[in-house]
Image (cartoon, rainbow, N blue to C red):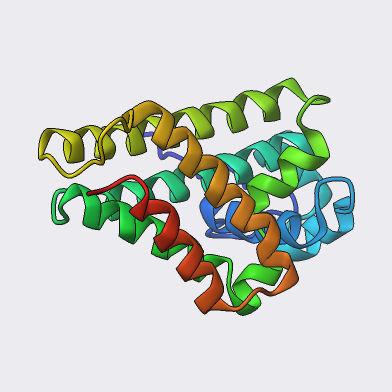
Amino acid sequence: MATQTAMPLPRGRPRGFDTEAAVERAMGVFWSRGYHGTALPDLLRATKLSRGSLYAAFGGKHALFLRALDRYIADALARIDAELGPQHGPVDGLRAFLAGYVDRTSGANGRRGCLLVATAMELAGHDADVEARIRSFFKATQAKLAGAFSRAKAAGELASGVEPTSAARILVCFVEGLRVTGKTGPARTTSQATADALLDRFIR
């Protein structure tokens, strides 16, 4: 009986290579340095891959960046789903959504900034692949928020004249603005008070 031989690993590729762990480590580098500020040696050190293995696994810096951005977006959307989930009423879900952004834009978290916002400022308008992902994220976030506002409206919890889609668009603009101002280290209490004041304009 013929015996099967193991396929050789690509040269320089660690045994037990974990693709998702490498993407997460690369995401951290891009998040800290930006796309253009990240050099290939930075990625090789972070992922612990050789140049050949990185290209074999991901196809190069740009493709790895897109994988990292996809991972960041997927994590963000999953978090939003949890915040707006059925365990909360619609208004409580919206408060949880805003509280999450207040947390992520306060202190050290805030000063780190947002990979998505930084990428939009650096690459949107110049990179069609990146722009499509960012546009899709904002559209998906707005749709999730509009759904929460619609449920609040059906429950009689929205103020008169509030339109769910417009309210959702305003919240998207607000939280992404928080991401930017978070770089300047605003007090958590100030950000939370502003978030509360905005949401209170939409509800009864």
Instruction: Determine the residue located farthest toward the front in the rendered image.
Output: 160
Q: Where's the N terminus, which quadrant?
A: top left
The residue lying at 20 percent from left, 47 percent from top is 90
* Side of 3 relative to 107 (left or right): left
**Where is residue 6 shown, x and y percent of the image?**
51, 45
Q: Nearer the viewer, residue 60 or 7?
A: 60
Relative image position of residue 125 (x, y in whole percent): 79, 25
Pinpoint residue 145: horizontal percent, then vertical percent.
35, 38
Give the x, y percent position of residue 36. Answer: 88, 46
Is residue 60 visible to the viewer in this orientation of the structure?
A: no
Q: Give the residue drawn at x 42%, y 29%.
A: 166
The image quarter in which residue 66 lies: top right
**Residue 142 appearing in the image:** yes
Tell me: residue 81, above or below residue 26.
above
Q: Is residue 70 left or right of residue 76?
A: right
**Picture quadrant of residue 55:** top right
Q: Is residue 76 above or below residue 70?
A: below
Residue at the outermost left position: 155
| Residue at 40 percent of width and 62 percent of height | 196
Q: Nearer the viewer, residue 193 or 94?
A: 193
Residue 121 vs residue 65, the one in the foreground? 121
Counting labels gives 0
For the point 63% across and 57% down, the residue is 179
Instruction: Indicate left or right for 137 with 39 as reference.
Output: left
- State whether residue 150 is above or below residue 68: above
